Amino acid sequence: MHPAPPRPLPALLAAMPKAELHIHIEGSLEPELMFRLAQRNGVRLPYASVEDLRKAYAFSNLQSFLDIYYAGASVLVKEEDFYDMAWAYLQRARHDNVLRAEIFFDPQTHTARGVAMETVIGGLYRACQDAHNLGLDAELILCFLRHLSEEDAFDTLEQALPFRDRFIGVGLDSSEVGHPPEKFARVFARCRQLGLHLVAHAGEEGPPEYVWSALDVLKVERVDHGVQSAKDPALMKRLAQDRIPLTVCPLSNLKLRVVPTLEQHNLRALLDAGLVATVNSDDPAYFGGYINANFLQTFAATGLDVRHAYLLARNSFEASFAEPSAKQRYIERLDVEFNTA
């Protein structure tokens, strides 16, 4: 462990370099930008104002959030809209000292409305390229919507393949319960053949069995969320032994009532069990905070300390899909922060 820097923990959490590995770009669409894009594109939203929209952010579960999430995405029509949304997130991420962001996007949410795949990927990819000017490495991960069919996922993959050089992996998101990972076994096998990185949401609201399925059927390299794994000691041992990262999203878990209070979050238990847990923001526009807010509020609520801060930041770099040389560079910057701050 590196020496603890002589500064208050909140300042360290804000300043330390980190990677974000679980961010849905559509979930970073702030109400103010949503209304600007709606006006630009002549889209009528079912809310009278930014304030009315924010009042609707009282979610009882994942599905109640998704209903608003998909409505908000309707304002994204042109390539410039996707660029503006991604660029707004990337600027915030850099302010939070994110050095690498691996960004989820949901093309089916847009192609179902008649927006071309080229439009979606074009805007997002251009923003990721421009992020290099901020000192931030950003890559895209295409997610399949699990409440839709595997056939629809195959169609989406085929539409995306002409742009294969613009995304590094695939994921699985949307309504978890009732849609186990094995539903998408064939399309994930195809993506594995294509050399894409594989991740999947599992064990957020779904049971530990979904995590087992993501590992053994989909053969994912990372599990998104995964907090329900703590209910299965054998699964916890497997995750620790195989060094399978979990992209944990504390404020999301609180907002969607996966945990009753932040004080009761099991992040410390995951770390204590030797798991490669990381902290991420998920859908920050809806869940009350970007990555630094997740760190600050979770540490304040759970009593995590400097050792945990270093471990979580280092885990985020190790769990990323960056090249080994880039990972080393990130970790060296992290070490400098902890040794000389």
Image: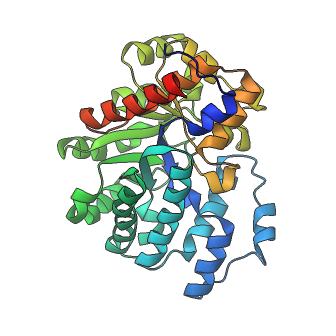
Quarter holding residue 254: top right
How many discs mark residues in the rendered view?
A: 0
Q: Residue at x 62, y 42 (%)?
A: 292
Q: Residue at x 76, y 47 (%)?
A: 60
x%, y% of residue 105?
44, 57
Q: Please, is residue 235 above or below residue 309 in the view?
A: above
Closer to the camera in the image, 165 or 151: 165
x%, y% of residue 207?
57, 29
Position of 21 with respect to 36 (left or right) is left
Position of 255 with respect to 117 (left or right) is right
Closer to the camera in the image, 250 or 146: 250
Q: Please, is residue 22 above or below residue 246 in the view?
A: below
Can the viewer see residue 219 in this picture? no
x%, y% of residue 71?
62, 69
Closer to the camera in the image, 113 or 251: 251
x%, y% of residue 186?
28, 43
Q: Residue at x 37, y 29 (%)?
A: 332
